[in-house]
Image (cartoon, grey):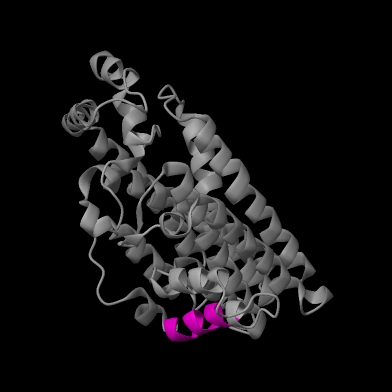
């Protein structure tokens, strides 16, 4: 596996301090929500708990392919993209009944499910308000991100909920779910950053394709890490996807073996931990984790080819930094 030296923000010369400050300002400057309210405090706690900030950084990188680089519009989009991601994590944790997030108690465990749902909804409304506050110039971005919001939080999560404990998911259905759940937002971050900076249309399209391929690889790697990493390193329980009835890529590939398929088909929400542990051990021995990793590499190969096509732009070096970071990801 590739290595990655330093932090991604340093490699990209992007200030995480500014991104975090802008995120906090979005909440603190909302006249309708007191800064001491449970809503504001909960969102600020989520922001301050950390996170990779991949999506805002991808938005900023996208802007470097245009003429109006890293403008206020771009940083506004960057904040909006991260808040969409934060809201999706709140809803994910509720649907998956996950107790932890980034090593801390999940929001619904602290506030209750009812309040957590409303806080997630508030974040989404604040995103649209943020993007439309400055007039018509932002309407195209508000429309695009509103569409992503609908897809990211509704369609992708509905598919995940509807397919729980349906382990006969086809590869095509898996790729569609993965694109909706993960790749779409990453691709849109690069695309909208470039649009806001006035980049050429063909470049915008290539950046979208690059983000799509990275996002697909990212989710496949996430599926693999769920089987291979400890709960301490991931910040969430290990093996949680299978235990929550999600047919991730290693599971789908392992189901081609009839004996493994029989074992996995027997898993239900009330199955004992031993049954899940046995299924996880079978998947480890099946070789499908390596096969899934190779599929991830194929997406990464396509993404690399796009960076080569954009080599006449100085910012293609930033795409390569993103590529190396994703390729080396172990958490």
User: In this view of the protein, which residue sits in the foreground, 303 or 217?
Assistant: 217
Where does residue 212 sit, x and y in percent of width and height? 52, 53
Where does residue 90 sit, x and y in percent of width and height? 49, 55
Where does residue 293 sit, x and y in percent of width and height? 29, 43
Vertical position of residue 169 compared to residue 42: above or below:
above
Give me the residue at 26% from left, 69% from top. Answer: 4
Say whether residue 210 is visible.
no
- Magenta highlight on residue 165: no
User: In this view of the protein, which residue sits in the foreground, 290 or 126?
Assistant: 126
Quarter residue 323 falls in: bottom left
Task: Work out which quarter of the rendered image holds the C terminus and state it.
Answer: bottom left
- Magenta highlight on residue 20: yes
Give me the residue at 56% from left, 66% from top. Answer: 83
Q: Image check: 179 left or right of 205? A: left
Q: Image check: 225 left or right of 149? A: left
Q: Image check: 51 left or right of 175? A: left
Where does residue 97 sit, x and y in percent of width and height? 41, 44
Vertical position of residue 289 compared to residue 6: above or below:
above
Residue bounds of the magenta highlight: 16-25
Predominant secondary structure in magenta? helix
Quarter residue 288 falls in: top left
Q: Image check: 41 left or right of 279? A: right
Vertical position of residue 268 compared to residue 103: above or below:
above
User: In this view of the protein, which residue sits in the foreground, 301 or 11?
Assistant: 11
| Name of the residue lying farthest toward the right | 136
Say whether residue 38 is visible.
yes
């Amino acid at each position: 596996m590739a290595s990655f030296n330093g932090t991604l923000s340093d490699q990209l010369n992007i200030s995480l301090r500014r991104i975090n400050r802008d995120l906090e300002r979005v909440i603190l400057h909302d006249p309708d929500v007191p800064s001491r309210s449970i809503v504001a405090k909960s969102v600020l706690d989520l922001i301050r708990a950390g996170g990779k900030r991949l999506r805002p950084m991808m938005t900023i990188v996208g802007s470097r392919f245009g003429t109006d680089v890293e403008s206020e519009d771009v940083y506004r989009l960057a904040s909006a993209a991260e808040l969409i991601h934060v809201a999706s994590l709140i809803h994910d944790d509720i649907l998956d009944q996950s107790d932890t997030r980034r090593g801390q108690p999940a929001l619904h465990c602290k506030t209750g499910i009812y309040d957590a749902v409303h806080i997630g909804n508030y974040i989404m409304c604040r995103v649209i308000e943020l993007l439309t506050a400055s007039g018509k110039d932002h309407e195209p971005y508000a429309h695009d991100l509103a569409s992503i919001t609908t897809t990211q939080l509704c369609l992708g999560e509905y598919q995940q909920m509807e397919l729980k404990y349906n382990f006969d998911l086809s590869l095509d259905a898996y790729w569609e779910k993965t694109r909706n759940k993960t790749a779409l937002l990453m691709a849109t971050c690069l695309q909208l950053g470039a649009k806001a900076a006035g980049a050429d249309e063909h470049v915008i399209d290539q950046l979208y394709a690059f983000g799509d391929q990275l996002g697909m690889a990212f989710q496949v790697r996430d599926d693999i890490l769920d089987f291979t990493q400890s709960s301490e390193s991931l910040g969430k329980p290990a093996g949680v996807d299978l235990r929550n009835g999600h047919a991730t890529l290693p599971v789908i590939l392992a189901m081609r073996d009839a004996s493994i398929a029989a074992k996995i088909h027997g898993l239900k929400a009330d199955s004992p931990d031993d049954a899940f542990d046995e299924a996880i051990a079978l998947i480890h021995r099946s070789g499908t984790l390596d096969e899934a990793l190779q599929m991830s590499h194929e997406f990464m190969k396509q993404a690399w080819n796009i960076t080569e096509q954009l080599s006449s732009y100085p910012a293609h070096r930033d795409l390569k930094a993103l590529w190396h970071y994703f390729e080396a990801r172990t958490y």
